[in-house]
Image (cartoon, helix red, strand yellow):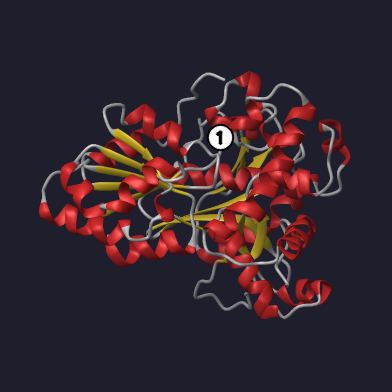
């Protein structure tokens, strides 16, 4: 599979001009190392999953950084926690931007190391698996069904793609989590992960999950934290504003990659997606991930929420940048009627917002009046959407 240009390229290049170090982080196999090699072609590349490279740094970490004070890229940085304080000393001892690039699969150890040792010295770039807007038209059609992990799209047959997804899940549970220092029973976590395919797109009820697993709510909360910190799921928080309404307090839950969602839910043929009962929720998660990634590429500290009142009025996504907010409803159907936008109208009225969007599966962009616009999914999938943020 030929190199696919990533939307995060421009951001990485810009941050390398501004900060002494940049961390590119995201799930395993999402393309972090490939991106760094493409952007930082003249950097020395080390991979801490390679025993020789790990030993090279572990033996004399400070000495190695002193001998290589710039243009150094280190993959899977979380495998050597001592690297972070050593980098702090190396950065403070010299000057200039663009000296170090780290990559890492998000983990508790990785996040702690960055926040405690390199605050103010390092910029962060979250890289997701392929988005629809990054793939060619020929490949983007399979993005919903198969998810976005590059190795899936490098395989041509259904069987080869299913084999890769099966191996990815097994490796994540049996190899990756222990390497992060996370000690959880693999069988329990896989059972929970599979159960979450039925919760995808719904309000999260931890007590129900705990009861089904026969464990405490505290245990399930900890398991969900691990899945979230390693980019397997997203807990979308409810949006709260100073309005005189009772609003939902529970988050909504989404498995972030639709390929893993479908695989864990038991789908084994792309044709099964057309009749799957959770198809609408799957599409909703696909659109949310695309839009959230769009904002992260272009904006400073964007936030994502959903909105729901106790009376049942709901909006799937609210994107917030500073004091600006855009509510977005997501519909799989090709037709949108007045009932489909009732929650959006209520949200806009309650929050005093003048513009709202409906992303839908139809082909025609239209204005419904009162600030509501219909946006075809293909506009989002091709990266042509212009959000008013």
Q: On the image, which quarter does residue 190 sit in?
A: bottom right
Mark 1 lies on residue: 130
Question: Against 20, is 110 above or below?
Answer: below
Question: Against 155, is 374 above or below?
Answer: below
Q: How far across and down, in percent of the image, does residue 132 sit?
A: 59, 32
Quadrant, the N terminus:
top right
Estimate how packed mark 1 is, as few (under 14), some (14 to 19) or many (20 or more) residues with alpha carbons within 10 Å: many
Q: Is residue 268 left or right of residue 118?
A: right
Q: How far across and down, in percent of the image, does residue 337 sit?
A: 76, 45
Residue at 73% across, 56% down = 200
36 or 278, nearer to the observer: 36
206 or 40, nearer to the observer: 40
Q: Is residue 113 left or right of residue 165?
A: left
Q: How far across and down, in percent of the image, does residue 331 sit?
A: 71, 44
Q: Is residue 191 left or right of residue 56?
A: right
Residue at 55% across, 67% down = 239
Question: Against 29, is 324 above or below?
Answer: below
């Amino acid at each position: 599979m030929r190199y696919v240009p990533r939307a995060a390229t421009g951001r990485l290049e810009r941050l390398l001009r501004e900060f002494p170090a940049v961390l590119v982080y995201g799930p395993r196999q999402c393309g972090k190392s490939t991106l760094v090699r493409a952007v930082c072609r003249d950097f020395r590349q080390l991979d801490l999953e390679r025993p020789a490279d790990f030993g090279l740094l572990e033996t004399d970490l400070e000495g190695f950084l002193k001998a290589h004070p710039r243009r150094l890229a280190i993959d899977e940085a979380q495998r050597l926690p001592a690297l972070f304080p050593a980098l702090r000393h190396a950065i403070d001892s010299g000057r200039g931007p663009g000296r170090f690039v780290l990559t890492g699969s998000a983990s508790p150890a990785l996040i702690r190391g960055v926040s405690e040792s390199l605050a103010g010295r390092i910029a962060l770039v979250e890289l997701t698996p392929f988005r629809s807007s990054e793939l060619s038209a020929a490949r983007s059609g399979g993005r919903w069904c198969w998810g976005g992990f590059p190795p899936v799209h490098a395989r041509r047959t259904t069987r080869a793609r299913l084999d890769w997804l099966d191996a990815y899940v097994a490796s994540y549970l049996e190899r990756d989590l222990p390497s992060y220092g996370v000690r959880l029973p693999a069988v329990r976590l896989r059972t929970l992960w599979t159960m979450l395919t039925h919760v995808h797109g719904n309000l999260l009820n931890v007590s129900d999950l705990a009861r089904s697993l026969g464990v405490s709510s505290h245990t399930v909360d900890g398991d969900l934290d691990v899945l979230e910190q390693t980019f397997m799921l997203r807990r979308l928080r409810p949006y709260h504003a100073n309005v005189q309404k009772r609003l939902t307090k529970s988050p909504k839950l989404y498995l972030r990659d639709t390929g893993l969602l479908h695989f864990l839910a038991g789908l084994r043929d792309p044709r099964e997606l057309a009749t799957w009962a959770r198809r609408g929720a799957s599409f909703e998660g696909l659109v949310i991930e695309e839009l959230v990634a769009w904002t992260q590429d272009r904006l400073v500290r964007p936030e994502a929420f959903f909105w729901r009142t106790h009376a049942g009025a709901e909006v799937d996504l609210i994107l917030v940048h500073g004091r600006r907010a855009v509510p977005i409803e997501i519909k799989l159907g090709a037709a949108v009627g007045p009932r489909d936008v009732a929650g959006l109208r209520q949200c806009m009225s309650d929050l005093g917002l003048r513009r709202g969007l409906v992303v839908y599966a139809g082909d025609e962009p239209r204005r419904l009046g009162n600030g509501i616009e219909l946006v075809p999914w293909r506009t989002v999938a091709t990266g042509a959407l212009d959000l008013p943020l």
